[in-house]
Image (cartoon, grey):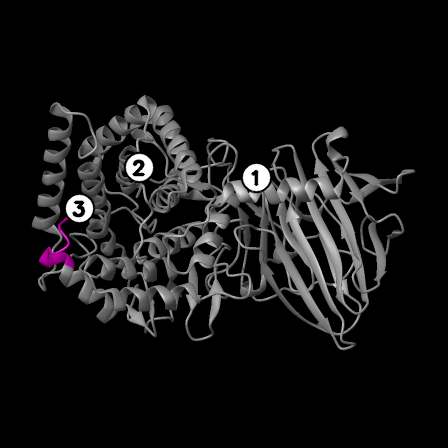
């Protein structure tokens, strides 16, 4: 926090609180280090994660060790500390449900589980990544603080005994110490809002009851999965990243490095169409209808609005991304420059149209694709027909090429939607188009060894080429896909993890980390082949690449056993969920 020194932690140690409109990262010292407001892509009010100002800490005063866990099927987190004096202290915390776009409420309940609980609480929110400090502070007769952060309104209950701390370079922080006897608890409720009236903190008891009920409604029991606890947690993460608009952000954060000093610096606080389709397809397999319906609604709206020129990424409001801008912040260690925004919305990514068709087919198979959805499917198919010869940036958002994965995933989408479409000429036309795309790829993008290669001009193998066979572009026993599966395991794996491709002559792990998405794809590929032992091995290895909060990032540093990149990565949790369902001997009744 700005008023005290906050050192960054390894990414594996952060927990996520989220309500769909924004998310908080909580560190081992009970420190809020990241939250944007009012929505994911807006400026941060807690930004110490990337070297900015702002924080909210609940920290034991004695030496302690940290742990924590999520209450099952929710993003209600319990930080737990055991002190040298033998005390056991918990802080139960969540962002309150139901969510509102104009207001966030952070609930924190400090509990003296065993022995006395002595903690320090510091509140120091700062707007615009630390530039606007907390001011106009006032304590009312009910013991509730109110204040302003620039144009934002703040209300805080539970800190009636707090004092202001002007020791920071700018603005005030509120500090209070708690001393609770064993069995006692104390509630804090922080509200940040766009309007004065909305910033009044709610009654904590009522807010907790509504939040608990909200998570019960959001996350199903998921009895037909393996790794049920992790599968439900994946559902909770995906739900927490999904706005009331239906848009699911790719990750809660920005500017977390994939490699130290490499200069990569991506902002993932936006909705990637591909990622949303992955989540929707996993939700369909798990019977998580709310996530399926919101994915179909958001992707369908983008297609109906932008047609064959649909962009690969949008804000949660369905708008174009704002221009990129450099932030004058130190960044998370390893980052050279902090940049808000992402250039991916300027790219053409052909595969997103195929993924959209796969999503719509999954919805149609469960009777959940309405006439608007069918219109969107027709637009996606038309986009593939019109643009399939154009070079595109592909799944990995690289320089334009005729990426084989993009073409084959479009064929998979066309085959899937044709199997659900009403009779007539349209399904036959879609199947013919799928055949034509597959034949063109077979003529130009098969390696001399018999496997698929990345593009006609790039003979390397790529883990993304597992996906077309998984999605039905080709039969499971297609020799080219089987050769690809063997090549990927032989050339792109290390110690139970999978890399995307070899960017250069360096050894695996030197150019970038293993891609957890690809590890789950390999599990699905072996499941499709009936090799359940191999499928389970890859699934178990990759879902274990996390810390106590069980959050997964995009990459995993195999040597150092550390997460790399933005956190949590939605598509990784989506594929974890899909694997958990695929490996269950009992499939959902409606799957």
The residue wearing badge 3 is 473
Q: Secondary structure under badge 2?
A: helix
> Where does the image place residue 42, in percent across and percent down from the top left?
59, 40
337 lies left or right of 91: left
Q: Quadrant of the N terminus?
A: bottom right
Q: Residue at x 55, y 61 (%)?
A: 549
Near-viewer residue (19 or 267): 19
Quarter of the image for residue 343 reads top left
> Where does the image place residue 108, in percent across and percent down from the top left?
72, 51
Q: Secondary structure under badge 1?
A: loop
Q: Which class describes the residues within 10 Å of circle 1: few (<14), some (14-19), or many (20+)?
A: many
> Where does the image place residue 466, in percent across and percent down from the top left?
23, 56
First in sequence: mark 1 vs mark 3 = 1
Q: Residue at x 46, y 31 (%)?
A: 318
Res. 356 mark: 2
Which residues are drawn in magenta? 473-481
In three-dimensional space, the C-alpha distance between marks 3 and 2, rounded to whole angstroms, equals 14 Å
């Amino acid at each position: 926090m700005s008023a005290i020194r906050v050192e960054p932690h390894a990414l594996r140690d952060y927990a996520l609180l989220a309500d769909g409109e924004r998310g908080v990262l909580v560190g081992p010292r009970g420190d809020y280090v990241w939250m944007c407001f009012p929505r994911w892509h807006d400026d941060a009010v807690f930004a110490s994660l990337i070297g900015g100002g702002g924080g909210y800490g609940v920290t034991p005063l004695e030496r302690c060790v940290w742990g924590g866990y999520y209450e099952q099927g929710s993003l209600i987190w319990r930080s737990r500390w055991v002190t040298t004096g033998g005390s056991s202290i918990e802080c139960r915390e969540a962002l309150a449900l139901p969510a509102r776009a104009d207001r966030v409420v952070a609930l924190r309940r400090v509990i003296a589980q065993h022995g006395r609980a002595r903690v320090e609480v510091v509140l120091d929110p700062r707007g615009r990544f630390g530039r606007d400090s907390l001011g106009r502070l006032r304590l009312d007769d009910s013991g509730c603080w109110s204040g302003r952060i620039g144009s934002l309104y703040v209300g805080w209950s539970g800190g009636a005994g707090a004092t202001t701390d002007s020791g920071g370079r700018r603005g005030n922080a509120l500090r209070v110490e708690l001393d609770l006897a064993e069995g006692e608890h104390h509630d804090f409720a922080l509200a940040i809002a766009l309007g004065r009236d909305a910033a009044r903190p709610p009654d904590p008891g009522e807010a907790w009851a509504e939040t608990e009920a909200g998570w019960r409604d959001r996350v199903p029991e998921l009895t037909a999965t393996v790794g049920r606890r992790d599968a439900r947690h994946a559902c909770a993460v995906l739900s927490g990243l999904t706005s009331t608009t239906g848009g699911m952000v790719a990750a809660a954060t920005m500017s977390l490095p994939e490699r130290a000093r490499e200069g990569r610096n991506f902002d993932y606080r936006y909705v990637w169409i591909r990622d949303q389709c992955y989540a929707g397809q996993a939700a369909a397999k798990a019977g998580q209808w709310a996530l399926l319906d919101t994915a179909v609604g958001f992707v369908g709206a983008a297609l109906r609005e932008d047609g064959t020129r649909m962009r690969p990424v949008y804000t949660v409001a369905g708008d174009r991304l704002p221009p990129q801008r450099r932030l004058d912040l130190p960044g998370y260690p390893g980052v050279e420059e902090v940049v808000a925004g992402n250039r991916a919305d300027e790219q053409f990514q052909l595969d997103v149209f195929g993924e959209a068709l796969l999503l719509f087919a999954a919805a149609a198979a469960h009777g959940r694709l309405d006439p608007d959805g069918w219109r969107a499917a027709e637009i996606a198919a038309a986009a593939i027909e019109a643009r399939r010869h154009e070079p595109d940036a592909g799944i990995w958002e690289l320089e334009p090429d005729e990426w084989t994965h993009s073409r084959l995933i479009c064929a998979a989408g066309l085959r899937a939607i044709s199997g659900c479409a009403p009779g007539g000429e349209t399904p036959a036309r879609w199947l013919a188009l799928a055949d034509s795309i597959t034949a063109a790829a077979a003529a130009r993008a098969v390696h001399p060894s018999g496997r698929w290669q990345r593009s006609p001009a790039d003979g390397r193998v790529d883990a993304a080429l597992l996906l077309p066979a998984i999605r039905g572009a080709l039969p499971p026993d297609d020799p080219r896909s089987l050769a690809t599966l063997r090549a990927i395991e032989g050339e792109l794996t290390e110690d139970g993890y999978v890399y995307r491709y070899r960017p250069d002559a360096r050894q695996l792990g030197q150019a970038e980390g293993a891609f957890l998405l690809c590890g789950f794809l390999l599990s699905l590929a072996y499941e499709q082949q009936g090799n359940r032992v191999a499928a389970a091995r890859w699934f178990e290895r990759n879902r274990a690449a996390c810390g106590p909060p069980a959050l997964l990032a995009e990459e995993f540093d195999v040597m150092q056993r550390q997460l790399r990149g933005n956190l949590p990565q939605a598509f990784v949790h989506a594929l974890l969920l899909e694997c958990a369902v695929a490996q269950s001997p009992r499939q959902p009744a409606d799957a």
